[in-house]
Image (cartoon, helix red, strand yellow):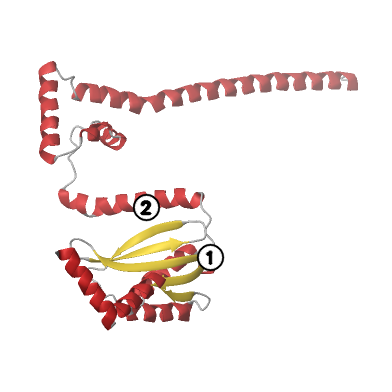
Amino acid sequence: METPAHRKEGSNKHIKGYERASERFKLEIRELNTRQRARAAELALLPELASSLLQFSIKPMMDAAQREKDDKLWSMAQAVMGLPFRTFKHPTFEEAYRFSSQFPGYKLPSEKRLRTTLLDANYEKVREEIEKKMFDHMVWDKITISCDGWTNRNSRPQMNMLHISRHNELAHRQVDGSNETKSAVWIAEHITKDIEERGPPNVLQFVADNASANILAGKLVRERYPHIIFGGCVAHGLDLLMEDIGKLPWVKEVVNDCKKFISS
């Protein structure tokens, strides 16, 4: 007849057997995980290894004659295009060459892409990097946004956008107005864009010369941002003042005498 003591002893044996089985199972799981991680590491190396082998098989090493010919082609290209010698030591050139040389079928971008989409993309990238570096170390509070129109050497109208604070000055961007009518609305749109970039509370005033389009643009900006002041350029005002003074008869006579003296 089974006594309570016998039942307890049997139960303990079952528990110990379960614990031993559980430990063996845990050990097997750990070993399986270890093997899986090792296999995953091996598989991760396969693409890199295959790529290296493929490059080695596709791109044979140059012999001395081939290297000499290649060097002469590069030298001729450098001379014909007038590239500075330091071009070949520039980090960006070396990086582009190393990356392109990994792909034997790579073709250089077309002149059209270089002039348009690629140039625009690189411009934006550099501008963002410069602004990030500058604004990370600058204090911009209550800034003045200033714009000034001018014409480049190709007779294309341009407009510079400047951001000025008590601590810093930044030539923020240049707007090409070749295909635009430089109206008050157009100027106000670009001023508004810069205000929104900096945040309206951080902008104190907008300054431009005293042209009628700029004055009207200032009014349009103030309608949207009443706290922003429009101020005419003091230097431009002084220039106009000096021109008016130069029209006085006695001043004009002195100026004419000076011109004769200089030209003689």
Is residue 246 among the parts visible in the rendering?
yes
* Tag 2 residue: 127
Q: CA distance from mark 1 to mark 2?
A: 22 Å
Earlier in the chain: of badge 1 and badge 2, it is 2
Q: Residue at point 53% right, 65% down?
A: 142
Q: Give the secondary structure at mark 1.
A: loop
| Corner quadrant of residue 187 | bottom left
Tell me residue 67's x, y (percent): 14, 21
Dot 1, how many residues are within 10 Å of its Cα: few (below 14), some (14-19), or many (20+)?
some
Q: Label 2 is placed on what type of residue?
A: Arg
Depth check, front residue: 1 or 194? 194
Dot 2, how many residues are within 10 Å of its Cα: few (below 14), some (14-19), or many (20+)?
some
* Tag 1 residue: 142
Left or right placement of residue 260 versus residue 123 in this view: left
Q: Nearer the viewer, mark 1 or mark 2?
A: 1
Q: Give the secondary structure at mark 2.
A: helix
Tell me residue 87's x, y (percent): 23, 35
Depth check, front residue: 34 or 41? 41
Left or right placement of residue 120 versus residue 61 in this view: right
Left or right placement of residue 140 versus residue 15 in this view: left
Tell me residue 88's x, y (percent): 23, 32
Q: How many marks?
A: 2
| Corner quadrant of residue 208 | bottom left
Give the vertical position of 78 relative to 143 (above or below).
above
